Image (spheres, rainbow, N blue to C red):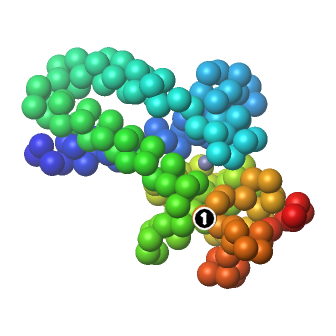
Amino acid sequence: MIVVAALLGAFTWTFLEYVIHRWAGHYKAFRKNPFGVEHIRHHIEGDYFAPSYKKLLIAVFVSALLMWPAAAIVGRALGVAYVVGLMGFYGVYEMIHRLDHTHPGIGPYGRWSRRHHFYHHFVDARMNHGVTSPIWDFVFGTYRKPGVIKVPAKLCMEWLKDPSTGDIRAEHAQTFVLLGKGR
Ligand SMILES: [Zn+2]
Ligand SMILES: [Zn+2]
């Protein structure tokens, strides 16, 4: 049961990841909130991430806030497992998102998560809000299968760029192209 509670917590995070990103990050009416401001800066600058200490403070605060009702509803052990699952998977999300931007990624999941996320960054920011999974994009009808992604030269990630030519590395040339090469 402990494992089920933790998995449910992780699953809850996938939903929050979608909701926070789509509505707090991109919905015009709410976009002025602190997360929205940080998120738009992340889109504009590409390599900007909100400071980790802010994320950590919020994570601790939210964990403390959730712990009490979770324990009251399902008992202390299951409540703690649920919150740990949720916040643990939030940590996984932070890692995956950061790695999407900074490293080329390993295996089918690594390739998938990059293409899914950079479609959101560079093709259509109204689509592909999920980062760790496409589940809620499917549910809410915002899933798009990325074709070839056109990356603006000034926002091109280091792992994608061949330093000797300034163009897209050969191994990614099927799936990414450079826009407006400023060489
Ligand atoms: Zn991003
Ligand atoms: Zn976004």
Looking at numbered disc 1 in the image, what kind of residue is underneath it?
A: Trp
Q: Quadrant of the C terminus?
A: bottom right
Quadrant of the rendered structure where residue 166 is?
bottom right
* Image coords of residue 108 (percent x, y): 46, 75
* Residue at 49% from the left image edge and 55% from the top image edge: 99
* Residue at 44% from the left image edge and 75% from the top image edge: 107
* Residue at 75% from the left image edge and 31% from the top image edge: 28
Is 48 above or below relative to 114? above
Residue at disc 1, secondary structure: helix
* Residue at 47% from the left image edge and 31% from the top image edge: 52
* Image coords of residue 22 (percent x, y): 62, 40
Quadrant of the rendered structure where residue 169 is?
bottom right
Q: Residues within 10 Å of mark 1 (few under 14, many from 20)?
A: some
* Image coords of residue 124 (percent x, y): 75, 54
Quadrant of the rendered structure where residue 100 is?
bottom right
Residue 135 in view, yes or no:
no
* Residue carrying label 1: 159
Q: In this rendering, would 150 be left or right of 37?
A: right
Label 1 lies in ligand 1 vicinity (Cβ under 8 Å): no
* Image coords of residue 137 (percent x, y): 56, 54
Q: In this rendering, would 89 be left or right of 139?
A: left
Q: In this rendering, would 169 be left or right of 150?
A: left
Residue 92 in view, yes or no:
yes
Is 168 above or below relative to 3? below
